[in-house]
Amino acid sequence: NRQAYQAIDMRRSGARMRQLFLEAGYDVKEIQRFLHLSCPQPIYRWMRGQTLPTVEHLYVLAKLFSMHMEELLVRERGNGEEICFFEVAFCSERIDAYRRQISCAA
């Protein structure tokens, strides 16, 4: 069963990251320090949907929020509906497997 490629909605992904930062009580300077960035501008660009974090930064942010890095992203659908990058059932299975893998590696 072949699935069509789904583009990442950069604006909504940025809004999702901003929401996660706020809900967790982190400000931009704290995220900057956590990611060892020399300046905060990349984080502001992510939150505005102008750019996406690197894979390395997505990985570190996912660890910070205890989620799979693809959960930080929102994909577009043809009808304009936004969804988490994974379908909910599949997402739960992947998250559980990912967390087991992390706990074994620690």
Image (cartoon, rainbow, N blue to C red):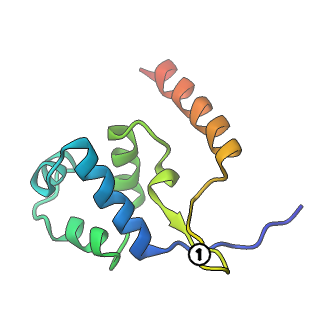
Vertical relation: 95 (above or below) 11:
above
Tell me the quarter of the picture where residue 42 sits: bottom left
Q: How many marks?
A: 1
In this view, the residue in front, 15 or 36, is 15
Residue drawn at (70%, 73%) of the image: 5
Q: Is residue 64 left or right of residue 80?
A: left
Residue drawn at (57%, 36%) of the image: 95
Q: Position of residue 20 (x, y in %)?
A: 32, 51
Q: Is residue 1 left or right of residue 43?
A: right
Q: Position of residue 10 (x, y in %)?
A: 43, 74
Residue under circle 1? Answer: 7
Residue drawn at (56%, 34%) of the image: 98
For label 1, count other residues whose C-alpha is less than 10 Å away and answer few (under 14), some (14-19) or many (20+): few
In the rendered image, is residue 25 in sight? yes
In this view, the residue in front, 106 or 73, is 73
Residue drawn at (27%, 46%) of the image: 23
